[in-house]
Amino acid sequence: MGPLRAQFWELPLAALNRAEWEALCDGCGRCCLHKVEDEDTGEIEHTNVACQLLDCSTAQCRDYKHRKAFVPDCLRLTLKIVDNVPWLPETCAYRLRARGAPLRDWHYLISGDRESVVRAGISVAGRVVSEVDAGPLEHHIVDWGDSDAAEEAA
Ligand code: SF4
């Protein structure tokens, strides 16, 4: 995996080792939510419905290591595809760093506190329902207020 170097989050994404790449995630849980794509327009709408493996109270994956065994289509974010995932939130650490922007002040690597992402209103913890209980996704369309939250929390 490799050691975590000092201030590694300021390095270009391409320079990160595996451990640093993993550690860059802010843990918001937004990428673990279902999206609905309009068949005609291709427009993507967001929902508050979480993957079956997400702990809805903490927004953490309950089995990150083996998630692919349970959820084969779980997206594995890599350097190659990070620019081609349009539904990632504006605040996603990978998205920010891919365009050379700094991490937000509430990112735990900056604040030193894993709960900052919750206090900043970015985490989905406690705000989502599991796909196991949700019913039709169309009943759960939400606007997460991406850019507003990002700017306010910056
Ligand atoms: S959206 Fe980005 S920062 Fe948030 S949990 Fe997913 S990969 Fe991590």
Image (cartoon, helix red, strand yellow):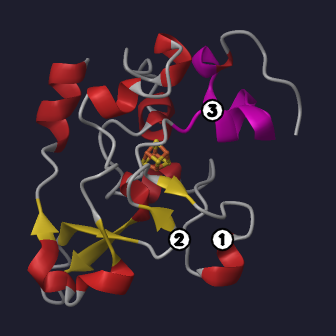
Q: Quadrant of the C terminus?
A: top left
Q: Magenta part of the protein: which range?
A: 9-25
- Residue 1 is inside the magenta segment: no
Instruction: Determine which residue is flagged by label 3.
Output: 13
Closer to the eye: label 1 or 3: 1
Instruction: Determine which residue is flagged by label 2.
Output: 53
Q: Which structural element holds mark 2?
A: loop
Which residue is located at x 21 percent, y 68 percent? 47
Quarter of image, res 109: top right
Q: Position of residue 17 (x, y in %)?
A: 79, 34
Residue 88 versus residue 47: which sits nearer the camera? Answer: 47
- Does 105 appear above or below 63? above
Residue 56 versus residue 44: which sits nearer the camera? Answer: 56
Q: Earlier in the sequence, mark 3 or mark 2?
A: 3
Q: Check mark 3 vs ligand 1: CB closer than 8 Å? yes or no.
A: no
Disc 1: CA contacts within 10 A as few (<14), some (14-19) or many (>=20): some
Lateral position of residue 126 relative to residue 51, left or right:
left
Q: Position of residue 104 (x, y in %)?
A: 37, 20
**Amino acid at dot 2:** Leu
Q: Which mark is residue 142?
A: none
